[in-house]
Amino acid sequence: MLHRFVTAYSILDRSLVRQGSDPAEALRETVRFARQAEELGYHRFWVSEHHSVPGVAGSAPTVLAAAVAAVTSRIRVGTGGVMLPNHRPLVVAEQFGVLESLYPGRVDMGLGRSVGFTGGIRRALGHGKDDADRFGDDLGELLGYFTGTRPAYPGVRALPSEGLRPQVFVLAMGAGAEIAAAHGLPMVIGAGSRMVDAVARYRAGFRPSGWAAAPYVMIAVNVAVGASREAAALLQLPEAWATARSRTSGVFAPLVPAEEIRGLEMSARERAFLEEALKGQVHGTEREVAVALGSLVEASGADEVLVTMNTYDLDRRLDSYRRLAAAVTG
């Protein structure tokens, strides 16, 4: 059933590995999940970029986005996001030019400014921490390959990208809000304590461009919907626990059942990191979640909500997204 949302609702999937499974299955599950998301009427389906994280299979987002686009027909497909400091703008332009050529009118180019998490990863990628500071310049170069203006490298053309227009989004991390505004691009911002201020700065500094005539705000939030508030909260526990463990052990472990986590004896440090990972998340029944998301949209003036929620049980995850679709369409 295809729904028409008043505020658009979309999905970010990070291809997390589950206990007893492997990265290959996590990637195949992402592709299956995209088909289900399309059937439920979600607006976009995005995949992510993580390097050298054993519990996260999503390392090559443009490749995975192509697989998703190949098995869907209506839903927009893209990245949340490609971390531009890790790549040369020419190569990114070429990749999205190929995607937009194969799946015209359905491709989103979400771009972030993060670099590899550790020194080893950064060295392996051939980039350092300081590369994030060049995000604005790299973004300008990347957009120029699509518009045909290439001041950095005269005579260099990104084909088949030139003249194409995938939708472009900037993930607002650090100075991302100002960079998105200066380039006249839609912005994605996490639903947290800094959200309202960042959105205000973005709207105040926005310059209309050939990519967007007016500001466009997408807020990202972890959302779980269940038959009860308690059941919904349990859905968010596996990913939060994996995040907490990564803070204490340096390894993002595969997701385990929520019931198993509830029976663990945690140290005070682990408990603190778990509570931190759960902060800012939205969960509850359909009615409770609709009210909470309505408040977030009202506070931010958001045009769209990007939902992410992974849990161990795939059937329960699908049920949550099905309930959310029903909740936000009344």
Image: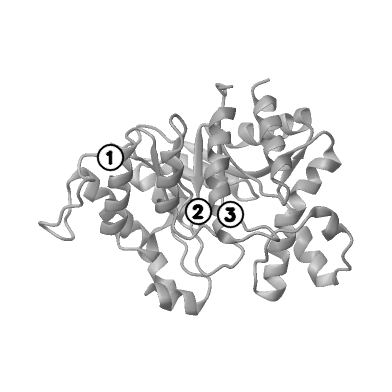
Give the residue number, with chain letter if any, for mark 1: 101
Q: Dividing the image into 4 quarters, which one contains the N terminus?
A: top right
* For residue 287, above or below residue 207: above
Ranked by sequence position, the earlier of labels 3 and 2 is 3
Give the residue number, with chain letter if any, for mark 2: 48
**How far apart are the two marked residues, 3 and 1, measured between alpha carbons?**
27 Å
Q: Please report the residue visible at 31 percent of the width from the left and 59 percent of the height from the top.
A: 138
* For residue 55, above or below residue 164: below
Q: Mark 3 is on which residue type?
A: Ala
Task: Decide if residue 197 is in sight here.
Answer: no
Q: Please report the residue visible at 53 percent of the width from the left and 36 percent of the height from the top.
A: 35
Secondary structure at badge 2 equals: loop
Secondary structure at badge 3 equals: helix
**How far apart are the two marked residues, 3 and 2, measured between alpha carbons?**
13 Å
Indicate the position of residue 101 as horizontal and vertical percent values.
Answer: 28, 40
Badge 2 crowding class, 10 Å Cα cut-off, few under 14, some 14 to 19, many 20 or more, is many
Q: Mark 2 is on which residue type?
A: Ser
In front here: 215 or 197? Answer: 215
Badge 1 crowding class, 10 Å Cα cut-off, few under 14, some 14 to 19, many 20 or more, is some
Ranked by sequence position, the earlier of labels 3 and 1 is 3
Q: Mark 1 is on which residue type?
A: Ser
Give the residue number, with chain letter if any, for mark 3: 26
Indicate the position of residue 123 as horizontal and vertical percent values.
Answer: 42, 78
The image quadrant of residue 5 is: top right
